[in-house]
Image (cartoon, rainbow, N blue to C red):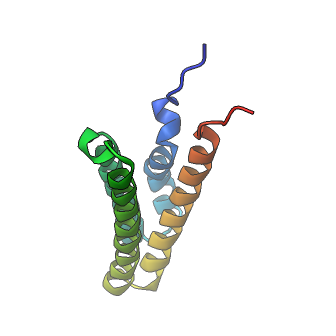
């Protein structure tokens, strides 16, 4: 009987890759400040999302669940955009680009994993 819940490492593969990629990418010369800002913002927002998913009161009915998810998604978009802007204004164009690329990479991995793990509808 297969488990309905995906393995924890696979669920957070984006976070694992961001953490493991940091020393390698910084060693080859990407902006450390941009990587720290982009990666830090991504990891912090993933932690907030995991915490929101674990609060049962936010998921009791469809309206509250939908409002919570929509509010989190819009807030996450705003905070990630702000992180890129802060990285660029504080540490230069390279830092902003690095932060943006870290966020886009992590988002792409999270999207692929969530698509692969979504519940299948019986036909």
Percent across and percent down for residue 64 are 32, 53
Percent across and percent down for residue 115 are 62, 47
Whether residue 95 is situated above or below residue 16 in the rendered picture: below
Look at 31% across and 42% down and name the residue there.
Answer: 60
Q: Quadrant of the N terminus?
A: top right
Question: Position of 44 compared to 94: left or right?
Answer: left
Percent across and percent down for residue 6 are 52, 30
Can residue 3 be seen?
yes
- Residue that extends furthest to the top in the rendered view of this protein: 1
Can residue 36 be seen?
no
Whether residue 97 is situated above or below residue 74 in the rendered picture: below
Whether residue 107 is situated above or below residue 114 in the rendered picture: below
Q: Quadrant of the C terminus?
A: top right
Count the numbered circles shown.
0
Percent across and percent down for residue 68 are 33, 56
Look at 46% across and 42% down and name the residue there.
Answer: 12
Depth check: give the residue in front, 79 or 33. Answer: 79
Look at 46% across and 61% down and name the residue there.
Answer: 26
Look at 57% across and 53% down and name the residue there.
Answer: 111
- Residue that extends furthest to the right in the rendered view of this protein: 123
Question: Position of 120 compared to 96: left or right?
Answer: right
Whether residue 72 is situated above or below residue 21 in the rendered picture: below
Depth check: give the residue in front, 82 or 29. Answer: 82
């Amino acid at each position: 009987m297969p488990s309905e819940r995906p393995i924890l490492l696979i669920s957070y593969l984006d976070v694992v890759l961001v953490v493991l990629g940091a020393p390698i990418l910084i060693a080859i010369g990407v902006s450390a400040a941009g990587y720290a800002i982009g990666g830090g913002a991504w990891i912090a927002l993933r932690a907030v999302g995991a915490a929101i998913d674990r609060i049962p009161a936010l998921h009791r009915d469809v309206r509250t669940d939908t409002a919570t998810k929509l509010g989190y998604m819009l807030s996450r978009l705003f905070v990630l955009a702000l992180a890129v802007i802060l990285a660029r204004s504080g540490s230069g164009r390279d830092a902003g680009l690095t932060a943006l690329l870290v966020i886009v990479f992590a988002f792409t991995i999270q999207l692929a994993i969530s698509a692969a793990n979504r519940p299948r509808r019986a036909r």
